[in-house]
Amino acid sequence: MTTLQVSTNHREEILDLTGLVQDALLSLGAEEGVAVVSVPHCTCALYLNENESGLLQDTLELVRHLGRLQRWQHDRIDDNAAAHLAATVLGGTVLIPVRQGRLALGTWQRLLLLELDGPRRRSVTVALLAEKAG
C-alpha cells in the first residue's frame, strides 16, 4: 500500500489521477488483482469517467446545482454541507481491475478526484488486492 499526496487549487475542481495511480501500482509491483483507491476525506470524491473538458464542467455544474437545492443543516457549522453531501453520493473509494500491471480501464475511462471544498492537500491511498498464484 502507498499514499499519494495531491494539491488542489480551487474550491471545486477535478484532477485526473490515472497516471499517478498507475505509477504507484508499478512501484508496488502489481501484476494481477484489484486496485483499491481511496481518499480519507469527507469533502472530496473519486469516480471513473471520461476526462473531457465539457464533461468535467458539466460535472462541476451538477454538483453546484445540487448544493443550491436548499439550505442544508450542516451549513450552520462550516458552510460546506454541499461538499459533504456530494462526496457521500459519489463516494471516496474506487475499485479497478489490474491486468499485467496496468489499470484495466475502458477506452475513455480515467480515475478522477473531485475536490469539493478546496483548495486543500489531499491524501490518496492506493492498495492492491492480488490474486494468489496457483
Image: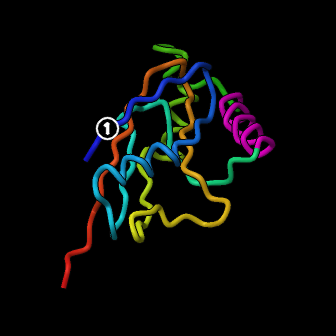
- Left or right: 64 with respect to 123? right
**Main SS, magenta residues:** helix
| Viewer-proximal residue among 68 and 129 | 129
Taking the spot 70% from the left edge, 32% from the top edge, the residue there is 69
Residue 11, quarter of the rendered image:
top right
Q: Where is residue 105 in the image (x, y as percent from the top left)?
A: 55, 64
**Residue at the spot of label 1:** 3
Which residue appears at 63% of the width and 23% of the height?
Answer: 71
Q: What range of the chain is rendered magenta?
A: 53-68
Front-most of residues 11 and 121: 121
Which one is in front, 57 or 52? Answer: 52
In this view, the residue farthest toward the right is: 54
Question: x and y percent of residue 131 in the render?
Answer: 26, 73
- Identify the residue at horizontal 32%, vertical 61% (top origin): 30
Residue 41, position in %: x, y?
39, 32
The residue lying furthest to the bottom in this view is 134
